[in-house]
Amino acid sequence: MTRSRSSSLRALWLLLFVPLGLAALLLLALYVHPVTGTAVQTAETSRQTDLGRRVEQSLAGFASDALEGLVPVKKFYTIEENAATAPAPNPALFGETEDPAEVQAVVERASALLEGQELVWNPDIERMPGTKICYYCDDTILVICWKESIEHGAANFAEVKIADGSQLRRMIAGGSYGSSVQLYASDMAKTANAVVAINGDFYTYRRLGITAWQRKVYRAVPNKVESAFFTSSGDMLFSHAGELASTEEAQRFVDENDVVFAVAFGPILVEDGELRQVYSYPIGEVDAQYSRSVIAQKDTLHYLLLTMGQEGASTHRVSTNKLAEIIHERGVKNAYTLDGGQTATLVFRDAPFNRVDWDTQRAMSDIIYFATAIPEEEWQS
């Protein structure tokens, strides 16, 4: 193909793309609230919002292909919300090292994904002796895992930055809510194609709190425990004990806030950047020394996972309030306790990253995980 013919074709692509872009703007104007500029969160407009996001992402991908070689256009990826599995990560992009400089080079390559956000991880962190830093990075996800010895216990961190809220996901063993199937966290992570995963709330073990799956509330017993809700945009929201007092009220909250799933364990450790002190709580043995598990949101599409337990010379476990102090010191916005004890499991590359209690994984009902959004056929081609 001659250069003039190639230029003519690209010009034709531009002529086609401009009206499509205008149509997309009109669509976005229809589903964005005219006063606040935020999506109107009702059951119907949530679907419109999701449609608008998919149109925007499709147009961005179209533009990236059409304008290749002319101007750089970011390509957007998303994962179908109810897909049983996510795209498989590229094995070539996993790494482990004892050299912080190697990880820093990966971080610098991920600058477009990070969009100026500061990481908790930094090259000067004093890691647990003899341990390595593990990582994965592509255009849609950055994960860095490391171990520290804190309060004489083993702190296992995984920092995650994703490009799209659809990459924050939950897997339920058996594939349907209420299933009696229980599986190891590492097996669920492997099946789901997770880059990194953490245990969930083990919802089948107790009957407290508000739980939701695929946008439907299945349990609303809110009088004793706090719940965490995860939205399609990748944010974590909370409800306190006694709030959302009925199934109908909980479902309305799910619809209005575009919630995809919710878990019920707790307590909340950090809320709006403020450390919370927990004096009593009906589950989790808050004052005892236990292995613990927490999920925290640091920034937009930016999470920090942590399990605390025993490993090597780090022989202590922690109380809930000590766990809260540790995660709060990392500058997170919100943090929530997940099921602990032998359930506390952080999985990276299909294997536990932490030492699970008694060196034996416990079969459980669910995990929360983060995945790449890049289709496997793209990195295989």
Image: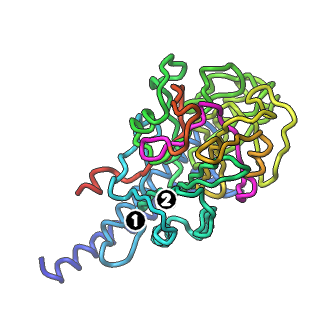
Of the numbered discs 1 and 2, the one sitting upstream in the chain is 1
Horizontal side of residue 60 vs 12, given as left or right = right
Magenta highlight range:
328-352
Specify the quadrant that holds the N terminus.
bottom left
Q: What crowding class fits label 1: few (fewer than 14 Cα within 10 Å), some (14-19), or many (20 or more)?
A: few
Report whether residue 235 is seen.
no
Residue 230 drawn at (x, y percent): 62, 41
Q: Distance between the residues labelled 1 and 2?
A: 35 Å
Residue 270 drawn at (x, y percent): 76, 48
SS of the residue at dot 2?
strand
Mark 1 vs 2: CB contact within 8 A: no
Amino acid of disc 1? Pro
Q: Which residue lies furthest to the left in this view?
A: 1
Q: Mark 1 points at which residue?
A: 19
Specify the quadrant that holds the C terminus.
bottom left
The residue at 39%/74% (across/down) is 72
In this rendered view, identify the residue nearer to me: 192 or 314: 314
Does the magenta-highlighted stretch encompass residue 350? yes
Q: Mark 2 points at which residue?
A: 142
Horizontal side of residue 112 vs 65, given as left or right = right
Q: Which residue lies furthest to the bottom in this view?
A: 4
Does the magenta-highlighted stretch encompass residue 106? no
SS of the residue at dot 1?
helix
